[in-house]
Amino acid sequence: MARAGDADAGGSAGSRPPAGQRPARARAQRAFWDGVYQRDPDYFARRGFFVHAIDVAPHAARAAERALARLRGGPGAHAVETDDARAALERRPAGSLDAVYSCLFLNLDFDRREHVALYRAVRRALRPRGLHLYSVRSVDDPWYGRGRRLGPDRYRLGPDGPTVHFFSREYARSLALNSGFRPEAVEGRAEGGREFPIRVMYVADRAVPPASAAPSARPAGLPLDRTPR
């Protein structure tokens, strides 16, 4: 990932807490999401990347705008866009990004067909050997299996809650290999605190030329999974 290159931080990080939740849990969730909206673009911008942040939710885009405004070196140094992530990626010139990063976006209410379409939009926008970096809630999440099952690893978490597509290591690997990526690393981590505990999986995939994207092409010495389930 080149310094002073382009890094897209895309996707809606999550839903606002449903009405009727316990106030402490609702406050914890709001603080968690608001921190995410600002933390990630701030992190990349402080390390010398040009950040083009995308979120479908206007309140999330405004939070990212506030974070980046504190760091701007001049007009147009960073960009924030309120839009659908896939549509925004498909408007980018092919091969124009060093990295695409998303936080808790791909585990929203997407089925496999939609995931493949999103992965391929990311792949088209990336330069050769560009990185697709993302976090998702994993099947080790304490919320996994709760609520109404809508499909493989997809659950609606209560009548007013969000639908979450939880990721397994195998699912993440399959999406990468079928979309022009080589899986490089997976790491699991507990996040969210006591009032809103979740289990997050961080994934790094590298864009490879079509001839190198076969399932057998795995780089030597790069762990696919550093954290046992």
Image: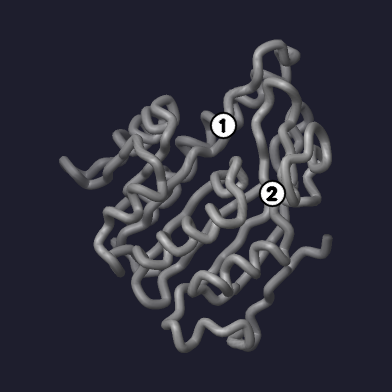
Work out which quarter of the rendered image holds the C terminus and state it: bottom right
Q: List x then y, in percent, for residue 56.
A: 42, 35
Q: In the image, is residue 198 above or below residue 170?
A: above
Work out which quarter of the rendered image holds the N terminus and state it: bottom left
Is there CB contact under 8 Å for labels 1 and 2? no
Question: Is residue 46 among what the camera can see?
Answer: no
- 10 Å crowding of disc 1: few (<14), some (14-19), many (20+): many
Q: List x then y, in percent, for residue 123.
A: 42, 67
Indicate left or right for 227 with 37 as reference: right
Q: Identify the element where label 1 is drawn.
A: helix
Q: Inspect the image, locate mark 1, and give the three-letter code of the amino acid beneath it.
A: Trp
Q: Nearer the viewer, residue 18 or 154?
A: 154
Which comes sooner in the sequence, label 1 or label 2?
1
Q: Quadrant of residue 228?
A: bottom right
Indicate left or right for 211 with 48 as reference: right
Question: Is residue 206 among what the camera can see?
Answer: yes
Point out which mark residue 200 bears: 2
Q: Say which residue appears at 25% left-offset and 62% top-offset.
A: 93
- 10 Å crowding of disc 2: few (<14), some (14-19), many (20+): many
Indicate left or right for 188 with 89 as reference: right
Q: In the image, is residue 193 above or below residue 175?
A: above
Q: Say which residue appears at 72% left-offset and 69% top-offset.
A: 225
Q: Inspect the image, locate mark 2, and give the three-letter code of the amino acid beneath it.
A: Val
Point out which mark residue 9 bears: none
The residue labelled by disc 1 is 33
Q: Say which residue appears at 46% left-offset and 88% top-offset.
A: 211
Q: Identify the element where label 2 is drawn.
A: strand
Alpha carbon separation for disc pair 1 and 2: 14 Å
